[in-house]
Image (cartoon, rainbow, N blue to C red):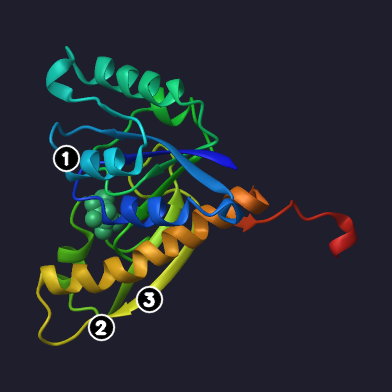
Amino acid sequence: GARVVVLVSGGGSNLAALLAAHDDPAYGARVVGVITDKPGAGALTLAQEAGVPSAVVAPADFADRDAWNRGVAEAIAVFRPDHVVLAGFMRILSPTVVDRFAGRIINTHPALLPSFPGAHGVRDALAHGVKVTGCTVHLVDAGVDTGVILAQATVPVEDADDEATLHERIKVAERALLVETVGRVAREGLSVDGRHARIGRAATSADR
Ligand code: GAR
């Protein structure tokens, strides 16, 4: 199966969903390493319980942002991954990381991009008064949440929602979408043509 490294900053519900899926060989992807920027992140316990090695790459342990990014790139490379999944990783990666693993970094975002990018996708959507929001699984490029979209799912906003209740509803859809999309990319591959991603082999003239 494809080797997947997961980067996390938070509780790790998306990581937990990937770990629940990867024991089935038919899934096609295996989490081979977990990396966090936060010493003590809940995700470390999840990794340990699943028998997956983990690494902490904390900014405080590096001289500056550049050094930290090089540390992240090295920590990822150790696991020789086919894909890198950002599952609630709350820091921006520089070209040092993004270019080294170009086209192989997948992020999940709790809004329907290109609306509401950034660190507060749920709060910003709620503040805007949207009636429908959702989640986006996309490739990471040099921008913030600007990469090619792989999959999206919609989630209704309810009148009584606050950021926490809405985020919880999004997370239910999000973990299913992330698990499904990572599995499909691992099993079928990915071809990208401009802004358009297609999971599966590249289109050939025989298809037209
Ligand atoms: C997820 O909803 C993810 O989309 C979001 O953080 C949450 C992490 O939850 N990421 C971002 O907002 C990135 N800007 P988890 O730790 O339970 O998987």
In this picture, residue 188 sits left or right of residue 129 = right
Between tags 2 and 1, which lies in front? 1
Residue 47 position, x and y percent, is 30, 40
Residue under numbered circle 1: 41
The answer, for residue 194, to whether it is visible in the render is no
Is the C-beta of the residue carrying label 3 under 8 Å from the nearest atom of ligand 1?
no
Residue 84 position, x and y percent, is 44, 38
Residue under numbered circle 2: 131
- Tag 3: Cα neighbours inside 10 Å, few (<14), some, or many (≥20)? some
Between tags 3 and 1, which lies in front? 1
Which of pointers 3 and 1 lies earlier in the amino acid sequence?
Answer: 1
Name the residue at 12% across, 69% down.
Answer: 163
Name the residue at 41% across, 72% down.
Answer: 153
Disc 3 marks a residue whose amino acid type is Thr
Residue under numbered circle 3: 154
Q: CB under 8 Å between callouts 3 and 2?
A: no
**Under tag 2, what secondary structure?**
loop
Is the C-beta of the residue carrying label 1 under 8 Å from the nearest atom of ligand 1?
no
**Is 151 placed above or below 85 here?**
below
In this picture, residue 200 sits left or right of residue 170 = right
**Under tag 3, what secondary structure?**
strand
The answer, for residue 183, to whether it is visible in the render is yes
**Under tag 1, what secondary structure?**
loop
